[in-house]
Image: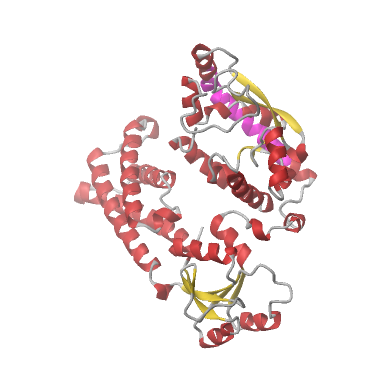
């Protein structure tokens, strides 16, 4: 997440609580007593507003960069907040929430957030406040980086153009919407004059092509020199498969497995799986009964999946399709409004309830909460033959949810699966408790809003 967006989130959080305090002041006038009850009311309402904003992707790039999206999400957040406030057990909270004050506070919060988003969009789009950069390269990686930077004004990088050894007609040619500035030698002139403050190296073959000494000199002078593949990962959350090699994982410090790390992962997974099973057991029981009443066949399916190091294991999930739906051959991915789904199956797939029995797989140690999604052996064998480095997904234990799952939907082609692999490899390369936590938070939002289910 860019520093600009972090600063926006902190400032808007302060604005929300300030606006609610002002609403309390205006509602009570001179008779307002700043008691713990008053601060408790502001704290509860403000926290619910911020939670709703986060759940509705209020700080996602596509929202922060477009005022229309921000306005619609803000209205949804305000409406959802009112519903939650009305449903809260006020006696249990020991906080009296005055409806008139809350309504006025909502109007005030809406006004300050609308102003905040307008100012942020205006400042983010100003070229003078973005760091001028030059991209070295004219291949697919360079084009992808330029597109992402154009799409993400919140990053604060403005691409002046590209330099390359490629044969262009003249210096006025364009590439991915930016000008061709000339051969790489123009970088030194732009660096000395202060026109460029960042160089992004996005060429395919670097061996013998980079003037390392000259680049070190401009870096020492204050210019930022960035690896294009690393920047692409920061912008997209996935690796660039065109420049990926097994050495990336071989030398990854985060991928190192130790007995202490294994013990902690296993302990956390076991503990939280037990807690989740206790909480979800009534829902699981009702779901199993509904499946049995709706159609013939078992409530829970057992499927062979490929796990860590290519080991096969049995995965449990609620049956959402008719018995014999895949008799013709291998398991086919679900499609939108899939005719194979039962009536109950359509609903449990929409809210991912069919995945709940995988808690037993986590208890057994076959899976973690977060990791690459395990698939059936036939599908995995086919993808290994067609997609380079696909086998590396097996380097870590699979998960009930994963970095690829929260960014990509169902895959129906080799290209889709290759793109999903790029997210999995990013996760494997950067595996950490922090990344797991972010994945779980994104999963919670998907489950809460019922997104992407088929």
User: Percent position (x, y) of residue 297?
Assistant: 58, 14
User: Percent position (x, y) of residue 220?
Assistant: 63, 82
Query: For the point 63% across and 58% down, which residue is it?
Result: 240
User: Percent position (x, y) of residue 21?
Assistant: 30, 51
In front of the other: 359 or 329: 329
The furthest residue to the right: 259
Query: For the point 55% across and 84% down, which residue is it?
Result: 191
In front of the other: 194 or 97: 194
Dominant secondary-structure state across the stretch colored magenta:
helix
The mark tally for this picture is 0
Query: For the point 59% across and 49% down, which residue is it?
Result: 419
**Residue 21 in sight:** no
Q: Is residue 2 above or below residue 194?
A: above
Query: For the point 31% across and 36% down, which residue is it?
Result: 96
Q: Is 284 in the magenta?
A: yes
Q: Is residue 34 above or below residue 290?
A: below
Q: Is 271 in the magenta?
A: yes
Residue bounds of the magenta highlight: 263-285
In front of the other: 196 or 388: 388
Q: Is residue 16 above or below residue 271?
A: below
Q: How is the image coloured?
A: secondary structure
Q: Is residue 201 above or below residue 101?
A: below
Task: Using the rendered view, name the quadrant where residue 394 is placed.
Answer: top right
User: Percent position (x, y) of residue 432?
Assistant: 65, 49
């Amino acid at each position: 997440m860019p520093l600009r967006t972090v600063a926006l989130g902190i400032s808007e959080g302060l604005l929300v609580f300030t606006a609610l305090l002002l609403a309390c002041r205006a509602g009570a006038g001179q008779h307002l007593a700043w008691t713990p009850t008053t601060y408790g009311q502001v704290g509860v309402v403000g926290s619910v507003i911020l939670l709703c904003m986060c759940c509705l992707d209020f700080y996602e790039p596509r929202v922060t960069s477009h005022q229309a999206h921000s306005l619609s999400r803000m209205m949804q957040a305000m409406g959802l907040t009112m519903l939650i406030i009305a449903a809260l057990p006020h006696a249990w909270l020991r906080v009296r929430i005055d409806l008139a004050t809350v309504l006025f506070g909502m109007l005030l919060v809406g006004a300050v957030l609308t102003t905040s988003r307008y100012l942020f969009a205006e400042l983010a789009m100003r070229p003078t406040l973005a760091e001028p950069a030059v991209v070295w390269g004219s291949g697919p990686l360079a084009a992808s980086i330029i597109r992402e930077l154009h799409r993400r004004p919140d990053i604060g990088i403005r691409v002046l153009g590209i330099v390359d050894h490629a044969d262009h007609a003249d210096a006025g040619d364009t590439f991915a919407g930016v000008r061709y500035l000339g051969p790489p030698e123009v970088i030194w002139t732009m660096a000395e004059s202060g026109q460029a403050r960042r160089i992004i190296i996005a060429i395919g073959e670097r061996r013998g092509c980079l003037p390392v000494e000259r680049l070190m000199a401009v870096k020492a002078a204050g210019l930022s020199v960035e690896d294009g593949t690393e920047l692409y990962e920061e912008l997209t959350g996935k690796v660039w498969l065109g420049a990926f090699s097994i050495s990336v994982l071989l030398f990854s410090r985060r991928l190192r497995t130790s007995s202490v790390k294994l013990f902690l992962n296993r302990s956390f997974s076991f503990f939280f799986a037990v807690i989740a099973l206790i909480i979800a057991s009534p829902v699981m029981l009702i779901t199993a009964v509904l499946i049995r009443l709706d159609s013939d066949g078992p409530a829970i399916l057992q499927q062979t999946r490929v796990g860590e190091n290519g080991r096969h294991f049995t995965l449990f999930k609620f049956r959402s399709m008719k018995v014999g739906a895949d008799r013709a051959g291998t398991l086919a991915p679900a499609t939108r409004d899939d005719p194979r789904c039962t009536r109950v199956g359509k609903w449990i797939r929409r809210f991912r309830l069919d995945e709940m029995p995988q808690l037993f797989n986590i208890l057994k140690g076959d899976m973690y909460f977060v990791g690459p999604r395990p698939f059936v052996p036939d599908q995995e064998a086919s993808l290994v033959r067609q997609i380079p480095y696909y086998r590396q997904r097996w380097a870590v234990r699979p998960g009930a949810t994963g970095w690829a799952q929260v960014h990509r939907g169902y895959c129906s082609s080799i290209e889709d699966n290759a793109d999903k692999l790029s997210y999995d490899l990013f996760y494997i390369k950067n595996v950490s408790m922090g990344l797991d936590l972010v994945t779980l938070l994104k999963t919670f939002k998907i489950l809460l809003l019922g997104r992407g289910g088929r």
